[in-house]
Image (cartoon, coloured by chain):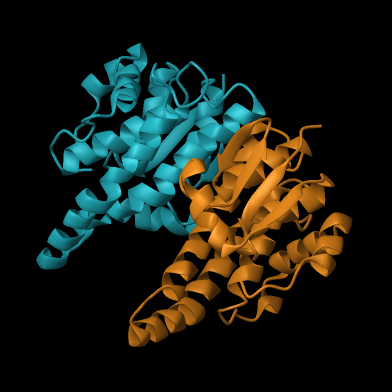
Chain colours: A cyan, B orange
């Protein structure tokens, strides 16, 4: 059994999909949470200057999607065929590339601009969930008929949105509601959701 | 062998990585270049209202990196082990970041801000970026193992596209990246494609 060491800051953030996947797979890992100064010291020695990083038996992989996909493979949630794997990839890439960046309103320091960006997120970005509703099956899976990392990442995104903008964002999206339910009721994930440290993002 | 149909606009853009992988893999495909007036009709039929899409086995894939990885796997170009594959993915992600930052500058509406951001991208970001990425190249002159992978091809393609609009730093300084470029451009399939591919504005 390889040893896994996941390093991130003291937040759920971009490490959380990794932690959710490890939980789903019931896999042990070292969950390292650095203070900002510790990260700045480590940064020049990291592969790409970004967190999270994952060490597997000492080999270090950087970049969030690369890390998540590797863990997904280790826990058998990356897709069973090449086509399924591509489908999982495209769902994650679409949420990651098209929706997640608009969450940046959270870090905007100018109060007026922040309000504007937040409104734009609610009015322009959130409605694009309709595309994902069409792509999720009625049983609540994006890929085939079992949970994949695409479902877990979608759950993570909705979870973050709920945290930053409380409200009912899945109104009318029956399939996406099933995706979220399937993920949150996965035994390993349910256990983690109860135990994990709550952080601002 | 399934039939592959790639659809995009008449340009390199986000489809080019897929075309390069098909070329390196020696896999034939239909290279559909959409006229702008045909796009509104196709758009609602695509998974995310975007191109490129790849049609295979009656299904539609979107997202260029996902498509590229799918094709690369058919020819063993995506890394031999999960760890190698993760390393390929890591390089793809970091190049994706470079491309997105360049894109953001390109699409900046305010002329003055655009000029400032372009200067920062060219003079600050790119030199630091290439210095970092150069360190990821192995002694073999490849990012992963000692053979061509999607990591090498992605590096070449993104740098090539970015270099069409932005002024790149002196790439001679990055000996690893230079070797990667040589490996990519001398791959027979890719060399042929680079000679034959249509000249397009983007």
| Horizontal side of residue B103 vs B196, given as left or right | left
In percent of the image, x 36 and y 43: which residue is there?
Answer: A14
Q: Position of residue A189 (x, y in %)?
A: 33, 19
The foreground one among B38 and B93 is B38
| Residue A83 in which image quadrant | top right
The foreground one among B103 and B156 is B103
| Horizontal side of residue B20 vs B102, given as left or right | right
> Looking at this rendering, what residue extends furthest in the left direction?
A111
Whether residue A181 is visible = yes
Q: Position of residue B92 (x, y in %)?
A: 59, 51
In percent of the image, x 28 and y 44: which residue is there?
Answer: A127
In percent of the image, x 71 and y 41: which residue is there?
Answer: B71
Q: Where is the C terminus of chain A found, in terms of image quarters? A: top left
Q: Position of residue A130 (x, y in %)?
A: 33, 38
Q: Position of residue A90 (x, y in %)?
A: 52, 40
| Residue A76 in which image quadrant | top right
The foreground one among B24 and A174 is A174
| Horizontal side of residue B200 vs B197, given as left or right | left
In percent of the image, x 46 and y 45: which residue is there?
Answer: B44
Residue A21, placed above or below residue B183 = above
> Looking at this rendering, what residue extends furthest in the top direction?
A187
Residue B22, placed above or below residue B14 = above
């Amino acid at each position: 059994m390889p040893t896994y060491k996941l390093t991130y800051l003291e937040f759920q953030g971009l490490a959380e999909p990794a932690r959710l996947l490890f939980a789903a797979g019931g896999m042990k890992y070292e969950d390292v949470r650095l203070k900002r100064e510790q990260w700045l010291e480590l940064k020049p020695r990291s592969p790409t200057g970004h967190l999270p990083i994952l060490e597997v038996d000492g080999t270090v992989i950087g970049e969030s999607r690369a890390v998540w996909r590797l863990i997904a493979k280790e826990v058998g949630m990356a897709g069973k065929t090449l086509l399924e794997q591509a489908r999982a990839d495209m769902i994650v890439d679409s949420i990651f590339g098209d929706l997640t960046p608009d969450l940046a309103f959270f870090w905007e320091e100018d109060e007026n601009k922040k309000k504007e960006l937040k409104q734009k997120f609610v009015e322009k970005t959130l409605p694009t969930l309709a595309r994902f509703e069409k792509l999720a099956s009625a049983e609540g899976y994006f890929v085939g008929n079992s949970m994949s990392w695409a479902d877990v990442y979608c759950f993570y995104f909705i979870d973050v949105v709920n945290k930053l903008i409380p409200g009912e964002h899945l109104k009318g999206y029956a399939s996406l509601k099933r995706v979220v339910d399937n993920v949150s009721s996965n035994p390993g994930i349910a256990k983690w959701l109860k135990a994990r440290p709550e952080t601002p993002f | 062998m399934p039939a592959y149909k790639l659809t995009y606009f008449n340009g390199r853009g986000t489809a080019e990585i897929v075309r390069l992988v098909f070329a390196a893999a020696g896999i034939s495909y239909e290279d559909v270049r959409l006229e702008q007036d045909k796009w509104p009709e196709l758009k609602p039929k695509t998974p995310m209202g975007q191109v490129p899409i790849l049609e295979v086995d009656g299904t539609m894939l979107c997202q260029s990196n996902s498509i590229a990885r799918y094709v690369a796997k058919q020819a063993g170009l995506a890394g031999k082990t999960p760890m190698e594959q993760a390393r390929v993915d890591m390089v793809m992600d970091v190049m994706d970041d470079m491309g997105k930052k360049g894109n953001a500058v390109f699409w900046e509406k305010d002329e003055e801000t655009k000029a400032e951001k372009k200067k920062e991208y060219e003079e600050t970001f790119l030199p630091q970026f290439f210095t970092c990425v150069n360190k990821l190249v192995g002694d073999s002159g490849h990012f992963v193992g000692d053979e061509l992978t999607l990591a090498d091809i992605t590096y070449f393609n993104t740098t090539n596209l970015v270099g069409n609009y932005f002024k790149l730093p002196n790439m001679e300084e990055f000996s690893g990246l230079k070797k990667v470029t040589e490996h990519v451009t001398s791959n027979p399939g890719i060399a042929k494609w680079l000679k034959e591919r249509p000249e397009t504005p983007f």
